[in-house]
Amino acid sequence: MNVKPLSDRVLILPNPAEEKTAGGLIIPDTAKEKPLAGKVVAVGPGTSEVKMEVKVGDEVLYGKYAGTEINVDGTDYLIMKQSDILATL
């Protein structure tokens, strides 16, 4: 991958959206909710004020409207500031 986040930014590969409910019903594309968890793919170097606490490979939770969606080589990613990450799993 040739995307390197700058400053205190993090590149995240979101987990796939659920295809079925627990009862076995298939969820149509229009009703699917955005995933709120993903895997860290790349991390910026941080700043003098912000030390990077997440690292590549971490599973993280983030806010519903956090980050900016980007498409790299046909794969959708989110890029966001480390402060938009709520927790690690």
Image (cartoon, rainbow, N blue to C red):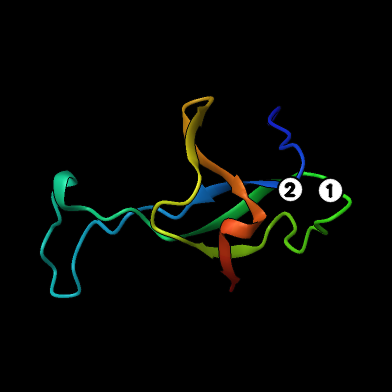
Q: Which residue is mark 2?
A: 8
Residue 23 lies, in percent from the top left, at: 13, 75
Q: Quadrant of residue 64?
A: bottom left
Q: Is residue 79 left or right of residue 51?
A: left
Q: Nearer the viewer, residue 58 or 86?
A: 86
Circles 2, 1 touching at the beta carbon (< 8 Å): yes
Image quarter hosting the C terminus: bottom right
Q: Which residue is mark 1?
A: 47
Residue 87 lies, in percent from the top left, at: 58, 71
Identify which amino acid the numbered label 1 is placed on: Thr
Q: Residue at x 18, y 68 (%)?
A: 21
Identify which amino acid the numbered label 2 is placed on: Asp
Q: Residue at x 33, y 53 (%)?
A: 34
Q: Is residue 16 above or below residue 25?
A: above
Q: Residue at x 68, y 58 (%)?
A: 57
Q: Nearer the viewer, residue 6 or 17?
A: 6
Packing grade of label 2 (10 A; few <14, some 14-19, many >=20) is many
